[in-house]
Amino acid sequence: MNSELKELKYGGLRIDPSGRKVHLPGRIIILAEMEFNTLYFLASNPDSAFTKKEIYHVVAEEKYMNWHGIIDNLIRQIRMKTGIRDIYTIKGYGYKFVSNRRRKK
């Protein structure tokens, strides 16, 4: 991911690609590289569903034969570290970032 990416905001959630930080009310969270890339990719494409394979090919620099569980683990870590609930599981398919939960009207 390059430093020219724009900051993303969804209500109290702010994703800062230049500092590679996730800002939530009252706290700043530093994610591992692939965790951050996964969150940023999904949040950059709100309300769009992606297969685990599509996500992996965007966020991983190396190709790995056993990518199936990697994305599940990344999503689990993102949820655990941040507490955000905007990443929805689409059973049997993949994941999507749902933007309207945090967006202020």
Image (spheres, helix red, strand yellow):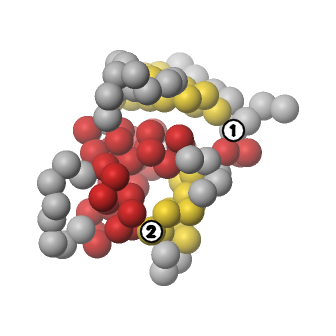
Q: Quadrant of residue 4?
A: top left
Query: Callout 1, which amino acid?
Result: Arg
Residue name at image x 25 percent, y 38 percent: 33
Q: Is 35 placed left or right of 84 in the picture?
A: left
In the picture of the structure, the residue carrying the numbered disc 2 is: 51
Q: Quadrant of residue 82?
A: top left
Binning the other alpha carbons within 10 Å of mark 1 as few (below 14), some (14 to 19) or many (20 upward) gives some
Binning the other alpha carbons within 10 Å of mark 2 as few (below 14), some (14 to 19) or many (20 upward) gives some
Q: Nearer the viewer, residue 59 or 11?
A: 59
Residue name at image x 31 percent, y 49 percent: 59
Upstream in sequence: badge 1 or badge 2: 2
> What is the distance, in whole Å, between disc 1 and disc 2 at their CAs?
23 Å
Vertical comparison of 12 with 46: above or below? above
Q: Is 59 placed left or right of 62 in the picture?
A: right
Badges 1 and 2: C-beta atoms under 8 Å apart?
A: no
Quadrant containing the N terminus in the rendered view: top left
Residue name at image x 61 percent, y 47 percent: 46
In the picture of the structure, the residue carrying the numbered disc 1 is: 102
Q: Quadrant of residue 8?
A: top right
Q: Nearer the viewer, residue 3 or 90?
A: 3
Residue 15 location (% of width, % of height): 48, 29
Vertical comparison of 92 with 80: above or below? below
**Which structural element holds mark 1?**
loop
